[in-house]
Image: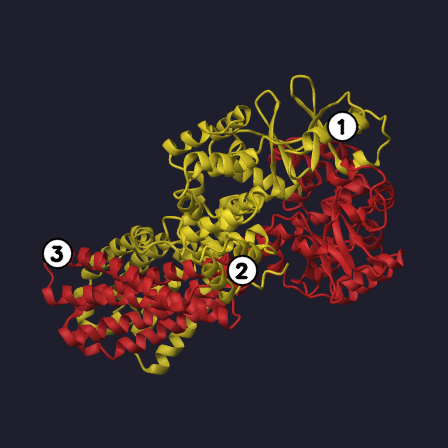
Chain colours: A red, B yellow
Amino acid sequence: MATEVIDKAYIIDIIAACSNKQVQVVADLLEDLHPEDIAYIFYDISLEDAQFIIDAIEPEKAVQVVEALDDDILSRFFKGYESEDIAKRFITLLDTDDAADMINVLPTQRANEVLSYIEDKQFAGQIISLLHYPENSAGGLMAKELIKVKDSFTVTECIEAIREQAEEVQKVYTVYVTDDYDKILGIISLKQIILSRADIKVGALMKNVEDLVKVNVYEEAEEVANLMYKYDLDAIPVVDALGRLQGRITIDDIVDFTKEEAERDYQLASGLSENVESTDKVLVLSRARLPWLIVGLIGGILTSAILANYEADLAAIPKLAFFIPLVAAMGGNAGVQSSAIVVQGLANRTMGAEAILPKLKKELLVGLINGLICSAILLTWNIIIGYDSMLGLTVSLALISVILFASIFGTITPLILNRLNIDPALATGPFITTTNDILGLTVYFLIGSLLL
Amino acid sequence: MATEVIDKAYIIDIIAACSNKQVQVVADLLEDLHPEDIAYIFYDISLEDAQFIIDAIEPEKAVQVVEALDDDILSRFFKGYESEDIAKRFITLLDTDDAADMINVLPTQRANEVLSYIEDKQFAGQIISLLHYPENSAGGLMAKELIKVKDSFTVTECIEAIREQAEEVQKVYTVYVTDDYDKILGIISLKQIILSRADIKVGALMKNVEDLVKVNVYEEAEEVANLMYKYDLDAIPVVDALGRLQGRITIDDIVDFTKEEAERDYQLASGLSENVESTDKVLVLSRARLPWLIVGLIGGILTSAILANYEADLAAIPKLAFFIPLVAAMGGNAGVQSSAIVVQGLANRTMGAEAILPKLKKELLVGLINGLICSAILLTWNIIIGYDSMLGLTVSLALISVILFASIFGTITPLILNRLNIDPALATGPFITTTNDILGLTVYFLIGSLLL
């Protein structure tokens, strides 16, 4: 089923059918759509129509639609339902990890109500145990559902165990082998099971735990992601301090986590302090931007206070002011370039074993080359335009200094933030441009007051 | 095996063993390491030592190490080998897609030589057919290795087919069902095969092609990634125009593609024009940064030319210059914030069905609120500090205008770039800050010359 059919006309048809309460028409219209595509339509329709759709389609598909909703749409959507409905129509039909994620979008009071309506108490208990883990930890990402067998099982017994457990596990990547105390001993792939003789013991086939990549429940999600990407894993077992199997994390959850992280980093670097989307309300959008604008404003006020010291110079040579934006902008650009490389190196771990000093030396060299080239261009221009040669020299000297300084500052700042466990992506944002403005212009006017 | 053991001392031990030509010591030191971890060490050692390591460890593991190397390290590493060695020791042991990727890092002449040394001509032919597809297309990402069966097969015959084909397929996610002309009819999961009666026909078990998400060989990689993420797929079948199965793309390749794309976007937004890493040479780093620095420089020169028109004003009121950096910086910050939201909305498709006009209205409102707040703060400050009230008013009015203007410009630019099929991530880079500088300061001095 192609996704291209979802155009404006299609959505208008659906909305019309919803407001006319035509259950069958809605069901027919949506029959060929994947649940993820139906979820996508929810961006463009009212809460009432969304509920009508959920009632019109098959219950199983409805759950998948709800599962595919974004957190903010989901939390609005749930407002139209009783806690009992949420528990019985949606939560109960999910895997534990998705159930826990869904419960997480509800206010605490509501979440407890919903949990109390879940009839399968073991399932509810598993969800609650998952809710205890920090959101961005292995425990917070894992699902309790997995297939496990004892190492003494034969392949036939193993297949029987899979048959019993497979119903509640959507995607079977591997089968986990444990001892009597749930301690993980190894894993075995479905491919191996299919291709092995029926009487072979699982223990003889499995990949041993020593060769296995696994994580502790409290491991940070970012580290889990790094391990799974590095070793090309589809799923990773999660164990407690005693090595007992607690759950597994599948690659799709890690991909979602990584995408959210990347969006957050990008927003931080762009000076947005909250996770916002263009569909959010004006006040939310405005609040997310204000902190950095005010940081920039304070920076600007500081710069104006510094420039105030050079009022006499400015009065004597107003031309000095012409190059204020150039000096400020070039510092910002060079600083952001340097910090971007460091931030990325830190993120993808290519900046591990090296020391800081050679890196700085290299950045200085790069800054010197680019500074010299830019300064030469600028000097040539200022001579052509006929500016006073000392002014031209001042601007060009300031430009080299600013680029050099910004390169160093752009390199060191993210490294320091990283040491302090602050997200280094902050360094490429308004923070670095503002600081460079202040220091760059100070250098400019110092050189100016010396030379002119 | 934990990865924490790879510390500096460990690497020094390895380097020492390599230069003393102690094959067994090197092999012992590396025995417990995953291939990906050994690849990681290659960042810190010489080409000769890397070759020594590859010779010291088991050939199969050696291939996995080489497979895990970054393109630039790989291309340097290959310089130490004859074409015949590359073909026989590495390429021949890989899947077609990884083999094609590896061939791609070699210069054309060399690549042809390597291909000619591959003894399995069918395999070589498959690699060559993959090399024909654009790098960022489904064909460029897919592997030829997959398991396929006929719809008339029983489950038993299907297992037999898997047994025959499984050796050359590393990860079996699903089995593809085709007709006699290789046209794809459906898929069937290993879980289904394990859990079904031996005499059932595959055709009766499979998920039909109509419900299947598949892509054409020429589909863009980004679209493939979107589909796989949206539908939580582990693998996606790739077909030609006649619906014939050409290969499959697995999630690990898509994850790699997405990470590279994200890095490239981040670099573009930071003003780096080439894909660079901190380990690259000084001249490479310098060249990657120069284009945007020069764009910034030209912007700065333009700004200086505009300010030159206001020399008389500046001479009369030098204090006007104090706020040049503030006005310029705030325009840049606000513009980047607006464009970041649009760029992200375009990337994750939440900005689909809406029209441009309501978005602009919203941005204007956000800009107005934040502009008013910032201007009020600034005006208060300028009154406290005792500046002339008309100067204070000028600066605050300019600030509102600049923030408003930057919000509009930051929203429209990425949308236009997107229409023109230019990567909108460019819009959050130096381009937008430079343009805002020029226009923001023009507004500032226009207001200044009117009010003062």
Local secondary structure at mark 1: helix
Is B451 placed above or below B232 here?
below
Q: Which amino acid does label 2 sit on?
A: Leu
Seen from the viewer's position, the closer of residues A329 and B248 is: B248
- Closer-to-camera residue (B132/B345): B132
Q: Kindly indicate the quadrant of the structure image that contains residue A76.
A: bottom right
Q: Which chain carries label 1?
A: B
Observer-nearest of B29 and A260 = B29
Label 2 and label 1: CA atoms lie apart by 59 Å
The N terminus of chain B lies in quadrant:
bottom right
Residue type at mark 3: give it. Ile
The amino acid type found where label 1 is placed reads Glu
Image point 46% across, 29% down: which residue? B117
Give the number of the disc on residue A285: 2
Horizontal and vertical percent position of residue A350: 47, 57
Real-space Cα separation, disc 1 to disc 3, in angstroms: 81 Å
Q: Which of marks 2 and 1 is in front?
A: 1
**Mark 1 burial class by Cα count in 10 Å: few <14, some 14-19, many 20+:** some
| Left or right of residue B58: residue A397 | left
Residue A287: x %, y % from top left: 53, 65
Q: Is residue B361 above or below residue B400?
A: above
Name the chain letter of the residue that bears numbered label 2.
A
The residue pinned by badge 3 equals A385
| Residue at figure coordinates x 23%, y 70% from the top left | A444
Vertical position of residue B442 compared to residue A10: above or below: below
Q: In terms of depth relative to the viewer, which is nearer, B304 or B37?
A: B37
